Image: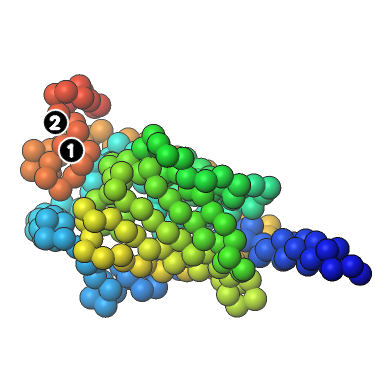
Amino acid sequence: MRPALLILALSAGAAAAEPDITGTWDYQGRVEAVRDINTNKPPAVPEVQALFDKRARLAAAGVTRRVANMLCLPTGFPSMMQWKSPIVVLQTKGRVTIISEHDPGNDEPRTIYLNKTMPAELDPSWNGYSVARWEGDTLVIQTAGLNDRGGVFGLPRGESTKITERLFLQDGGKTLIDQVTVNDPKTLTKPWTVTLKYSRMPEDTERFEAVCEPDLEALRATDLAALKETDVEAARMLDPALAYNPGGR
């Protein structure tokens, strides 16, 4: 075989060798970070640490639900990747699509583009904008353009939040690893990595509907003013400029 043809053949073989991550995956918990927060605390800036402390005091007083939960708002990325229900990964030409199965949340599918670059301007959204490339057996994903209404493993997030994932298979394709590195100078003093782990479920696993219904009774009983410093949706509901008044409040 001539050298040029050999190079083409090797290139085609390399492209065909991309791992198949299509399937239904059962989340096994955060391996390095939030499961044992004492061993991998986020290197939070002082303002964010103060926010954590306020939330801890509210939790000790019995405040355990967020307004977003009561309103069935999306959890968004990366929270949608760490729910107790499975995720479905669809690997197709030019993109990877991730669909969550959980309630509450009513999440949009997440699209990861394999043939695009990050746009110069982004419209902030719940899942952000994700582009990726294969580096050998690892899918390296860059995500930006997140809105400020979700969270990143308990951290606030926004347009300054940039997330890099390294997605790869282990155990002969039975385990999917997602190493998530968060970079945000507004919330962190340095990048912070959280590792997510999933087990492959049988091929005939079915996906079930999980529909969230707003809990307006709980919302009416909630003291939004007491939560506005720690809960972005409570603050939004109290902002007269937004005229945001679900539940008749």
Instruction: Tell me which residue sits at (75%, 63%) in the image.
Output: 11
Q: Nearer the viewer, residue 106 or 12?
A: 12
Residue reaching furthest to the front: 3
Kind of residue sitting beneath label 2: Leu
Q: Nearer the viewer, residue 166 or 229?
A: 166
Point out residue 242 in the picture as x, y percentages from the top left corner: 21, 24
Point out residue 84 in the picture as x, y percentages from the top left corner: 43, 59
Point out residue 245 in the picture as x, y percentages from the top left corner: 21, 25
Q: Is residue 23 above or below residue 102?
A: below
Q: Is residue 82 above or below residue 6?
A: above
Q: For this view, does 151 lie left or right of residue 87?
A: left
Instruction: Mark 1: give few (<14), some (14-19) or many (20+) Cα within 10 Å.
Output: many
Instruction: Tell me which residue sits at (60%, 77%) in the image.
Output: 171
Secondary element type, mark 2: helix
Question: Quick check: can you spot residue 84?
Answer: no
Q: Nearer the viewer, residue 20 or 14?
A: 14
Location of the C terminus (image quadrant)? top left
Instruction: Tell me which residue sits at (31%, 55%) in the image.
Output: 152
Find disc 2 in the rendering and name its residue.
Answer: 238
In which quarter of the view is residue 165 placed?
bottom left
Location of the N terminus (image quadrant)? bottom right
Q: Which mark is residue 147?
A: none
Q: State the separation of the CA atoms marked 1 and 2.
A: 6 Å
Q: For this view, does 75 lie left or right of residue 118?
A: left
- Label 1 with label 2: CB-CB less than 8 Å: yes
Find disc 1 in the rendering and name its residue.
Answer: 234
Secondary element type, mark 1: helix
In which quarter of the view is residue 133 placed?
bottom right
Instruction: Tell me which residue sits at (41%, 44%) in the image.
Output: 128
Instruction: Mark 2: give few (<14), some (14-19) or many (20+) Cα within 10 Å.
Output: some
Kind of residue sitting beneath label 1: Ala
